[in-house]
Image: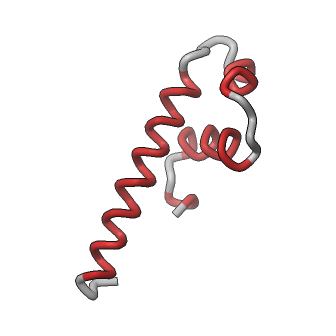
Amino acid sequence: MLAAMPEGYKTIFLLSVIEEYSHKEIENFWASRPKLPRSQLFRAIKWIKKNIFEESNLINYGLL
């Protein structure tokens, strides 16, 4: 599922969730756009939830 995730979402998701960087640390990487990481992380989580829900529906209906 991560391979299909948009690159910007994936980068922030990996830094935050997998690498466990704080929001402040991630914001320092994007000094020119400090609010970008928070919005990207929110969108990444929303994207994951949507795709998990769609995939589980496909499995439930025997389509996957």
> In terms of image quadrants, where is residue 35?
top right
Q: Nearer the viewer, residue 5 or 59?
A: 59
**In the rendering, at what x and y percent does residue 47 appear?**
41, 49
**In the rendering, at what x and y percent does residue 60 appear?**
28, 81
Residue visible at 36% across and 70% down? 55
Residue 43 lies left or right of residue 56; in this view the side is right
In the current view of this chain or complex, which residue is farthest to the left? 61
Q: Nearer the viewer, residue 32 or 28?
A: 28
> In terms of image quadrants, where is residue 38?
top right
**In the rendering, at what x and y percent does residue 51 appear?**
38, 60
In the current view of this chain or complex, which residue is farthest to the top? 32
Q: On screen, 48 above or below 57?
A: above
Residue 33 lies left or right of residue 20; in this view the side is left
Q: State the scheme by which the image is colored.
A: secondary structure
> In terms of image quadrants, where is residue 31?
top right
Residue visible at 47% across and 45% down? 45
The image shows a total of numbered marks equal to 0
**In the rendering, at what x and y percent does residue 15 appear?**
70, 40
Q: On screen, 63 above or below 45?
A: below
Residue visible at 74% across and 41% down? 20
Residue visible at 56% across and 39% down? 8
- Quadrant placement of the C terminus: bottom left
